[in-house]
Each structure stands twice: as C-alpha cells, then as structure tokens.
Amino acid sequence: MPKSSNGAGKSLVRATLAIHEPPLGTGTSPGALIRTFAFDFNPAQLSLSRSAQWKMTPAIAVRDGARLEFMGSQPRAMSLEVFLDSSDRPTSNSVLKKVAALMSCCVVTAKSKAAEQPSPPWVVFQWGSFSTARFTAYVSSVEASYTLFGTTGVPIRATCQMQLHEIPRKTRRQNPTSGALTARRVHQVVAGDSLQSLAWREYGDAASWRAIAEANGVDDPSRLPTGTELVLPAAEEVRH
C-alpha cells in the first residue's frame, strides 16, 4: 500500500492508542499509562458495531407468534487497520518495534501478574473529536501482514488488523436510597493541565488531586501526557 493511497495519513489530527495497565481489584477504569501508540497514518477506515440481545420464547396456541424479551445491549466492538511504513529508512527496524507494541496488547503485563491479577493491557483509541470511537477496550486480536522488506530482510512496511472490544464501566450510585447516578466523567488532558488544576476546576479544592490520581492509577502526578483520558470521580466520592 503506497503512502499516496492513504489520504487520511495527511490529517493534522493523529489517531492514538493509549495503552494502560489493567486496574487492580474490581475497578473499571484503566490503570497507569504504559505508552501512547501514535499512528503514522490515520486509519483509512474503521468499523464500529453494537448489538442488542433478545430472547424469543415460543408461544403455544397464540397465532401472533413468539414472545420477545429484551436481555440487554452488548458492548461496542471496533475493527481498524493500522498502516506502518519506514520505506524512506530502509535499514530502520521501527516497523518491527511498532508491530511488537501492538502485539503486546494481547500479552499479560508484568505488573498485573505480580499482583496475581494477570491481564493484558486495557486500551483507549482516540482520534480528535471522534467521540463515538473513544471507549475503554481490550484487544482481542492483532494480525500483521508484512508487505515490503529492506535489503537485510527487515520488514519496512506492514498493515495490522486490530479487533477491540469495549469494557463496560460499572455505574455507581450516590447513596442506596436516592437512586441518583454519580456524575463521574472523563477528561482528555490538554497542554497545561495538572492534577491540581483539574481538582480545583472540578471540586474547588486543589488538594483533591489525590482522588483523581488514585482513580486513574497515576504514580507520578508530574507526568501527565497530553491526550491521556482521566476519569474524574464524582464530587460525592471525593468528599467521602
């Protein structure tokens, strides 16, 4: 696939895949950021799907047909293509390294194994304001096709097919009697953000930054990469 055939590669907004440690315990928010995979070329296309599950019970002696019962919605699924190319640097092994980084999304992380909760990384695909495609997911498969090789046999062009599946988040309540949902939300880090400034803006108390750090598994609050997604706990959770 020549570069010119992928017009999306010239877009000013690059797609990224944030690769996180899985959470410990029963949390449903990604753990600490392992790395951010920046796409060399934006996907020329990606597919999103979601389905609803229904149960059909045959109805005896009823001419109108079977009785339908809604059982729930299935999480979202995404398939996308990642194009990698270093043909302008024929001795580079960058394609090999990037394919290995994507393949690692299907391998148990060392930290989760040490904590006796083995799990592959959790990921968040991001592409500018394309919010429909942004959700926490696991990678079920990565298939790499190498299509061009350097003089030493090292691959310098590859296309990877990835399958992502949404990890549903639990809905938390403010208290057992009200039934009201907490106002947890997700914030995408921009230049100039810090945990302290987010805590001041969200809760009116800069000292509450620790609640944000704990909710997202942030070990070093001084390192907050632009584009990272942070879960901001509800004010009720912070107060408690």
Image: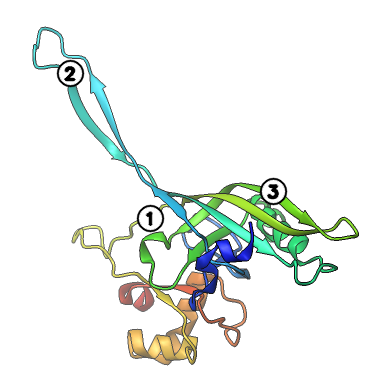
Q: To which residue does mark 2 refer?
A: 66
Q: Can residue 76 be spotted in the picture?
A: no
Q: Which mark sits nearer the N-terminus, 1 or 2? A: 2
How far apart marks 1 and 3 lie (CA) works out to: 37 Å
Q: Can residue 70 be spotted in the picture?
A: yes
Please state which amino acid type lies under the numbered disc 2. Ala
In which quadrant is the N terminus drawn?
bottom right
Measuring from the top left, give residue 175's x and y in whole percent. 26, 63
Which disc, if any, is residue 145? 3
Q: Which mark sits nearer the N-terminus, 1 or 3? A: 3
- Give the mark toward the camera: 1 or 2: 2
Which disc, if any, is residue 115? none
Please state which amino acid type lies under the numbered disc 3. Ser
SS at mark 2 in the image:
loop
Q: To which residue does mark 1 refer?
A: 170
Left or right position of 220 against 52: right
Please state which amino acid type lies under the numbered disc 1. Lys
Q: Which residue is drawn at 33% across and 60% down?
A: 172
Q: Does 69 sit above or below residue 153?
A: above
Measuring from the top left, give residue 105's x and y in whole percent. 64, 55
Q: Which mark sits nearer the N-terminus, 2 or 3? A: 2
